[in-house]
Amino acid sequence: MSKLINDPLAVSLFSEISAIDHLLKVRLSKSLPVGMEFSHFVILNHISTLEGEKTPAQLARSFNLTKGAITNTLTKLSKMGYVHIRPDWDDARRKKISISTTGKNARDSAVESIEPILSDLMEFMGAEKTKSIIPFLRNLRILLNEVDR
């Protein structure tokens, strides 16, 4: 058995990250426009920053989800008119995903609705502290993603 299990510092780090993740999702979810789920926002926000179209498999990898899980969410987003799903003309087995104008507007509306939460967070943290913590968080995410593979 690893000695880390009894390391209160490691347990505290895990507990704090888990609590922050949960609380942030709950607060943001309550502020999103009616009908938009947190998973919808995250995917729309991600797609809105991409150049060109992506496949469901590429998006699934980005979010560490199964292809079935991402397909389910993309189907919902398509029914809402937020994304376009089309066949890949080079490989009929694949689909291509892009954000629609309606999806961009929905994403922008969602960002506007959560802006007060983000503004309060930035006021509390400050730009310098935020800049200093992002590399740590990014490295932790990368490490956890590599361990999972």
Image: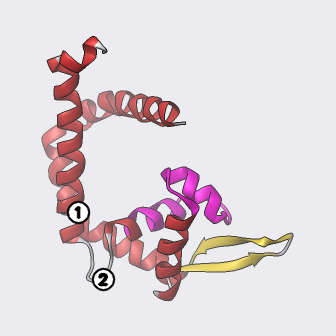
Of labels 2 and 1, earlier in sequence is 1
Horizontal and vertical percent position of residue 61:
57, 51
Amino acid type at mark 1: Leu
What is the residue that sits farthest to the front in this orientation? 1
Horizontal and vertical percent position of residue 76:
47, 81
Q: Which residues are magenta?
A: 41-67
What sort of colour scheme is used for the picture? secondary structure
- Horizontal relation, residue 147 to residue 9: left or right: right
| Residue at 52%, 32% in the rendered image | 146
Quadrant occupied by the N terminus: top left
Horizontal and vertical percent position of residue 51:
64, 60
Q: Quadrant of residue 10?
A: top left
**Disc 2 and disc 1: Cα gap in Å?**
13 Å
Q: Residues within 10 Å of mark 1 (few under 14, many from 20)?
A: some
Horizontal and vertical percent position of residue 40:
40, 70
| Residue at 55%, 67% in the rendered image | 68
State yes or no: discs 2 and 1 in contact (Cβ < 8 Å): no
Q: Quick one: SS at disc 2?
A: loop
Q: Is residue 126 visible?
A: no
Label placed on residue 35: 2
Q: Is residue 3 magenta?
A: no
- Dominant SS in magenta: helix
Label placed on residue 5: none
Q: Which residue is tagged 1? A: 28
Quadrant occupied by the C terminus: top right
Q: Is residue 59 magenta?
A: yes
**Which is more toward the observer, 44 or 16?**
16
- Horizontal relation, residue 37 to residue 5: left or right: right
